[in-house]
Amino acid sequence: MALEDRKFLKFLSIGGDANEDYRVMQVIILAFGRKNSPFILSVVIKLHITKFEAEKPESVSMLNFGLYVDDLYFGADIVREAIKLLSDAVTLLGNVDFNLRNLRFYNSELKALWFENRFSESEKESVKLNVLGLSLNLEKDVFSLEVKGVVDSLKTLDNSKCCVLQTAL
């Protein structure tokens, strides 16, 4: 935790000594709940991948800017370059026990090359990909919203404020 932030994270410790009623204590490490877990995960991953910056600077840069929690977004000018970056990313993350798996490809040529070179064990035949709660059909290149589950759940709910709020969440 940064020194300038420590003055804002204090707590009271009560009854530590017979002569004192309380003490003001200062937090000096990252407090749970102060930052969310994606931040912590990002710091841990960046700490590990910077070890490989001298060997594979392009791949480390791609992971630094394109990896967020469990999603990797990146692009390349040619498919061969994308395959190289992706295979390096899988190797780098594998070296520090992070398993980059369940890859979905927007480019069919990249997907074919990936499985042709046996970078992955099995190919998923699905042409649908979930993006921000929407379904993306990769073949047709269209988004759709699945509402059948919501409509079905409305049939069983009571007509009350609580149920309306529950459905909205």
Image (cartoon, rainbow, N blue to C red):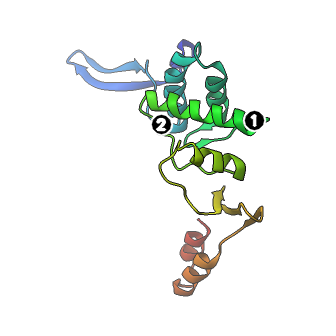
Where is 92 relative to 146, above or below?
Answer: above
- Classed neighbour count for the residue bearing mark 2: other residues with Cα under 10 Å, few (<14), some (14–19), many (≥20): few
The spot of residue 124 in percent (x, y) is: 55, 58
The spot of residue 49 in percent (x, y) is: 53, 23
28 or 145: nearer the viewer: 145
Q: Residue at x 50, y 37 (%)?
A: 37
Q: CA distance from mark 1 to mark 2?
A: 37 Å
Q: Amino acid at mark 1?
A: Ala
**Tag 1 secondary structure:** loop
| Residue 147 appears left or right of 52 | right
Label ID, residue 76: 1
Label ID, residue 33: 2
145 or 50: nearer the viewer: 50
| Residue 164 appears left or right of 141 | left
The spot of residue 33 in percent (x, y) is: 47, 36
**Is residue 48 at least partly visible in the picture?**
yes
Which image quadrant is residue 60 in? top right
Label ID, residue 112: none
Q: Amino acid at mark 2?
A: Gly
